[in-house]
Amino acid sequence: MLKDYNCLRGQPQNHTAAEFDVFKNECAIWIKLMQLGGEWEFFCEPISNADVRAQTCVYDSARQIKFQMNMHTHDNFNLDYKDLQMAAFHEVCEVLLYDLERIARLEDISAEQKEAMLIRARHKVIHHLEKLFYLMDKTDIINNMRKNIITPTEV
């Protein structure tokens, strides 16, 4: 059960293991729905960093992703159930868009090469979104997945 943040507002608090599990499970759901499991190896870990609610660390050469959720909270970072879900969705979208960012930072290639790479990466994102939205349109798959909690190792 998640804490009622309204009555705890303004007090330093820590997220519970159950709240971290919500974040972790939501990450796993969106990884699976966006079909990113074959491209990356995923990890989730709690952190204690006052600057972020959650963050995504990319280890490109190893094709590993680490989702991190801040377990220490304050007024600016209080998360309810929906916020935890949205934070997870946001972090998985970071992975979906990562290749566009990586390509944009490349300096040792021609403008034509970069443009070709960006076009491929952009279409890759579009194809992931097409699959996601057309799948969601056909079923109530997200709520079904939330009922049958999956873990990042199952994606």
Image: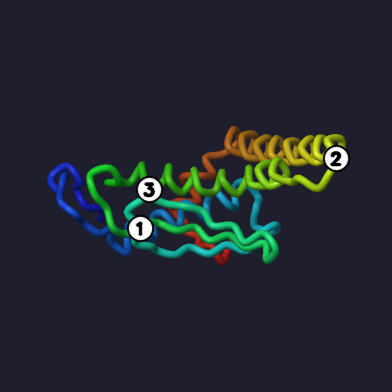
Residue of label 2: 110
Q: Which residue in the protein does label 3 denote?
A: 84
- In this view, the mark in front (3 or 2): 2
Secondary structure beneath label 3: helix
Residue at 67% from the left image edge and 62% from the top image edge? 63
How far apart are labels 1 and 2 at the CA level?
Answer: 39 Å
- Secondary structure, mark 2, is loop
- Residue at (58, 60) in percent of width and height: 65
The answer for how far apart the CA atoms under marks 3 and 2 are is 41 Å
- 17 or 97: nearer the eye? 97
User: Between marks 1 and 3, how big is the CA–CA gap?
Assistant: 16 Å
Q: Residue furthest left?
A: 7
Q: In the figure, is residue 62 to the left or right of 65?
A: right
Please tell me whether mark 1 or mark 3 is closer to you in this view.
1
Q: Residue at x 24, y 49 (%)?
A: 74
Q: Quadrant of residue 119?
A: top right
User: Which residue is drawn at the image coordinates 52% and 40% (left, top)?
Assistant: 140
SS at badge 1: loop
1 and 2 marks in contact (CB < 8 Å): no
Task: Name the colouring of the figure.
Answer: rainbow
